[in-house]
Image (tube, rainbow, N blue to C red):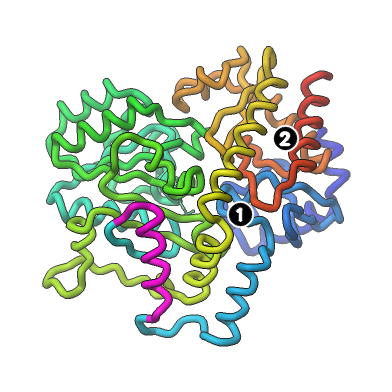
Amino acid sequence: AIQRFQARNPKSFEHHEAAIGSMPGGNTRTLLHTAPFPIAMVRGEGTKLYDLDGHEYFDFVGELTAGLYGHSNPKIKEAMTSVLSDIGLSLGATNIYEKKYADLLCSRFDLDSVRFANSGTEANIHALAAAREFTGKRKVVVFRGGYHGSVLAFGLGIAPNNVDREDWILSQYNDPDALEEVFTTHNDIAAVLVEGMQGSAGGIPGSKEFLRAIREQTRKAGTVFILDEVMTSRLHPGGLAATLDEKPDLKTLGKYLGGGMPFGAFGGRRDIMAVYDPRKQGSLSHSGTFQNNTLMLNAGYTGLAEVFTPDVTIQLNKKGEKFRTDLLEIFEGTEFTVTGVGSLMCIHCTKMGLTSTQIRAKDEYAPYEDLDLKKLFWLEMMEAGFWIHQRGSIALNLAMDAEAMEAFVRAVKAFCSR
Ligand code: PMP
């Protein structure tokens, strides 16, 4: 399969070799590197991607959840064009577009107040700073497998590029007892930062019991509960938080909410967010140049207000549930399974064929992964015209029709019945 891959993609290979000259490993986004070399795309339209060697793919990666609208959504395109022609890009001043989008985010995601950033990473960094300032404490509890951004990655340990290593406490995802132990041992915890469904770790839903335990422990300890909704805000009209019994103190947002432009936002309790109130002496600074740029604000606002309405949100996630159920049926009794919530999922492949309910934490399933078989699956699906991430992550987009999903299911069936 690797040989066929090489023979099929000579231009991508050439492009990669040349790119090594100016970027380490020819790469500027670690997650997109693949061996033996990555495929270079030249264009996207609707739900299709087109590569340098003239192949086309159904896009099931969906830009790791940020590509919710599909490529070139006409309404968002129009919003962007009107900014370019009528408004101007970056005004170097407070503008009238930020309030409009802030109002919409607050009402949709149940926030008292919100601030914008340029990425999900930044949103999390600023939410953590707010929690530290508000509580006067330093430490932050995160979970093995958690991903909160480039410099906030906790694969199975602390990210090697993390600057303040001593401040992190790593606990076990989906394990309320381990969390209780952490709170018994430490008394200086400013925040718990958690994904309601771990995305990078393989689409692992957090159990209600676990998320409730976080709420209880943080309330008792005077710790800020930050729910990272960068990926999961698309899973319900009010974000994943709206499906939980209890409310986090802060939420962070990102990805599709920029309508395709770089985006981040963080918000929640008014008293905590007030640490950024510039009218107060000694307030924290949050001053990124592009965080109120009109292109992002208008594209994001238009997408959420006019395209990803609550009805559409519910429909897309129903489609995802059905798609995942179809895949689960095919995977039964094989090495493969699929986990996830709604329109976001991850295909797993383990030597003993763990089932979706057995995949509860990354460090538990990682030792059993059959990476060779998973790689073969990825190569063959790509050859059949389906763009999926080698990690197995799938994010459905609004341009995805039933035909594409049925074709995907047939291709998976063909792979599994060989
Ligand atoms: N949090 C989560 C849960 C994410 O999945 C990501 C991105 N994959 C981030 C934060 C970081 O967002 P960004 O890439 O925009 O910095």
The answer for how far apart the CA atoms under marks 1 and 2 are is 20 Å
On-image quarter of the N terminus: top right
Magenta extent:
95-111
Amino acid type of the residue that numbered disc 2 sits on in the rendered structure: Trp
In front of the other: label 1 or label 2?
1
Q: Residue placed at 80% from the left, 37% from the top? A: 407
- Say if mark 1 contacts mark 2, CB within 8 Å: no
Above or below, 410 relative to 251: above
Left or right: residue 85 versus residue 41 is left
Q: Quadrant of residue 387?
A: top right
Q: Residues within 10 Å of mark 2 (few under 14, many from 20)?
A: some
Q: Residue placed at 56% from the left, 28% from the top? A: 339
Q: Earlier in the sequence, mark 1 or mark 2?
A: 1
Q: Residue placed at 56% from the left, 87% from the top? A: 86
Q: In this view of the protein, can residue 410 be seen by the observer?
A: yes
Dot 1 corresponds to which residue? 67
Dot 2 corresponds to which residue? 378
Please state which of residues 209 and 9 is positioned toward the viewer in this rendering: 209
- 304 part of magenta stretch: no
Q: Secondary structure at mark 1?
A: loop
- 101 part of magenta stretch: yes
Q: Residue placed at 79% from the left, 34% from the top? A: 380
- Residue 99: x percent and y percent? 36, 72
Residue at the front extreme of this rendering:
311
Left or right: residue 270 versus residue 47 is left
Amino acid type of the residue that numbered disc 1 sits on in the rendered structure: Gly
Circle number at residue 179? none
Please state which of residues 98 and 337 is positioned toward the viewer in this rendering: 98
Above or below, 94 relative to 257: below
- Residue 62: x percent and y percent? 63, 49
On-image quarter of the C terminus: top right
